Amino acid sequence: MNIPELKQFLLYSTLLNYAVLIVWFVVFVVARDSLRGLHTRWFKLSPENFDAIHYAGMAVYKIGVLLLNLVPLLALYCMG
């Protein structure tokens, strides 16, 4: 895989991962009660724990996207 293909791959990967993150956030905001009802069937979660788990999951996912997709992409663009 050459550098231009790698740049394109990382760009599309970054955009796709951010789209997943945005969809996750929108579903969490819009359908929070339905989503919590679905999860509390399987696990005993308080509303505070449910919110904390989703917030932490989004944070870990975002950090992963930054470290594994965006930073290498920016490094390739800085190299020329």
Image (tube, grey):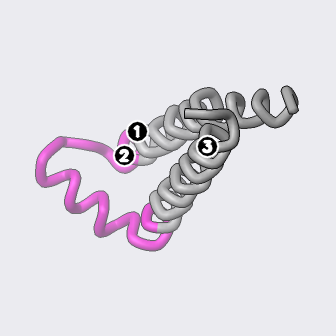
Q: Magenta stretch: give its range.
A: 27-50
Q: Earlier in the sequence, mark 3 or mark 2?
A: 3
Q: Nearer the viewer, residue 8 or 37?
A: 8
Residue assigned mark 2: 50
For the point 30% across and 62% down, the residue is: 35
Q: CA distance from mark 3 to mark 2?
A: 40 Å
Q: Which mark is residue 42?
A: none
Q: Position of residue 79 (x, y in %)?
A: 85, 27
What amino acid is labelled 3 in the image? Glu
Residue assigned mark 3: 5
Q: Quadrant of the N terminus?
A: top right
For the point 47% across and 72% down, the residue is: 30
SS label for mark 1: helix
SS label for mark 3: helix
For the point 54% across and 47% down, the residue is: 13
Give the residue at the far bottom of this rendering. Answer: 30
Residue assigned mark 1: 53
Q: In the picture provided, is 58 more to the left or to the right than 6?
A: left
Q: Mark 3 vs mark 2: give the one in front.
A: 3
Q: Is residue 49 magenta?
A: yes
Q: Is residue 75 above or below residue 69?
A: above
